[in-house]
Image: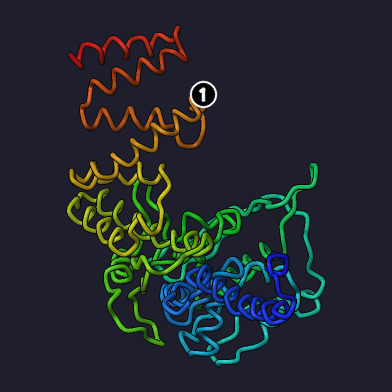
Amino acid sequence: DYVRRKLNKQSLEKGVTYAILALGFLFIPARMLQANYNEHDRSKNWTPWDYAYNLLQSCAPHAILFTNGDNDTFPLWYLQDVEGVRRDVKVACLSLLNTNWYITNLKNFDPYNVGKVRINLPDEQIDKLSVMQWDPQTFTIPPPDSLSSAVTFTMKNTLQYGSVKAIRVQDFIVRQIVMDNNWERPVYFAVSIPNESKIGLDNYLRMEGMAQRLVPEIKKPGLEFINLDVLRNQLYKSDLEPDKNYKPGFKFRGLNDPSIYYDDNHIRMVQNYRNSFIRLALYYLQTGRKDSTSLTLDLMEKKLPRNLIPLETNLKFELGNVYFDAGAERQYKSLYKEVETESVNMIKTKSDNISSGFNPYRALIKIYENLRDYRKLADLWQQIQVMYPNDPVVKENVEKYKVLSK
């Protein structure tokens, strides 16, 4: 319309109109391709494949693996059905365990001849399962041999309607599978499964990578419950070629490549890798192996650099504390500098918010105490005194650090 208004010759109007339309059809898609291609390009994005592979390889041969939902289930089925990876593992999706047809399928069908999942319920009873009233009950699984301990757990309700307590079908079936299996096959829970879906077995779940194995051994207080040899192999042998059979050694392809776009869903899923690294590092720290602690966290940063796979401020703070306790001065100073900047910004934007899950004031106090920066401590306690002018503890710290900062 604009061009037509500007044209003096009516004879040119038709030709110019067609030319403009042709250019529009050509350049608008080209511009869309230029603007959006990177966000939609999957050519180098191995995250779904690797996550599925790592989760399957977290399981010993012929295991039963409980998964949570879409993202930790469908990619596993793809690897098993299409690429033939770890077909010996029976994947049991908790979301689908609320449906009668899926339970029956899990019980009766064995497409790869690796053994059906033992569920000692008749199909007629499975067809009638639904949400059921449930008061907490304690169960015991006898030990697999004379050297092991029995597993005793209390299964609580996961639903409540007024005063009526209840459980989901998935809770009932998980208990049924665990009890009926009776140690015939290894049983694992994916790390993405929330605690309320583990039917009270938390203290008997030992980490072996991206999944926790049910074992006849109870977690010891103050010590990370991991299989050291297996977990170390998973994290440190990432250069091994993928294998269709059981072979510990995770894949982290592309997570340190700045040219690959990762959306929030990708970033949320791969945070589970950090959980494995951190638990291994904490185990080393708890057993006095400080060098191994810092090396494990350094490897985590190499595989999942925080400038590409972001870390929340509270986790940076906790990692800084681990580095500090391990005596890794360079690493903790780097993390503390980032936490300090982010905490100061939090205080500036929300000066009255000190009761959230992450408390920037407490974090800064800890950082400045570790670094013995008494001047900043004095300034910080004076800020806190403005909010709590009559608090004797605050007043005491203000005077204390005024003296130390001189």
Q: Is residue 75 above or below residue 276?
A: below
Query: Residue shown at 44%/28% (left/top)?
Result: 348
* Kind of residue at badge 1: Asp
In the rendered structure, the answer to whether residue 183 lies left or right of residue 360 reads: right
In the rendered structure, the answer to whether residue 288 lies left or right of residue 317 reads: left
Residue with the most extreme front position:
8
In the rendered structure, the answer to whether residue 277 lies left or right of residue 189 reads: left
Q: Residues within 10 Å of mark 1 (few under 14, many from 20)?
A: few
Can residue 66 be spotted in the picture? no
* Residue beneath disc 1: 352
Where residue 318 sits, quadrant-wise, is top left
Which color mode does the image show?
rainbow
In percent of width and height, residue 341 lies at: 35, 36
377 and 321: which is toward the camera: 377
Query: Residue shown at 40%/43% (left/top)?
Result: 313
368 and 72: which is toward the camera: 368
Number of numbered tags placed on the structure image: 1
Q: Is residue 371 above or below residue 331?
A: above
In the rendered structure, the answer to whether residue 12 lies left or right of residue 391 reads: right
In percent of width and height, residue 223 lies at: 34, 50
Where residue 206 sits, quadrant-wise, is bottom left
State which quarter of the image contains the C terminus: top left
In percent of width and height, residue 324 lies at: 23, 41
Q: Secondary structure at mark 1?
A: loop
Query: Residue shown at 22%/47% (left/top)?
Result: 331
In percent of width and height, residue 136 lies at: 67, 50
Can residue 282 be spotted in the picture? yes
Where residue 167 sits, quadrant-wise, is bottom right
246 and 326: which is toward the camera: 326
State which quarter of the image contains the N terminus: bottom right
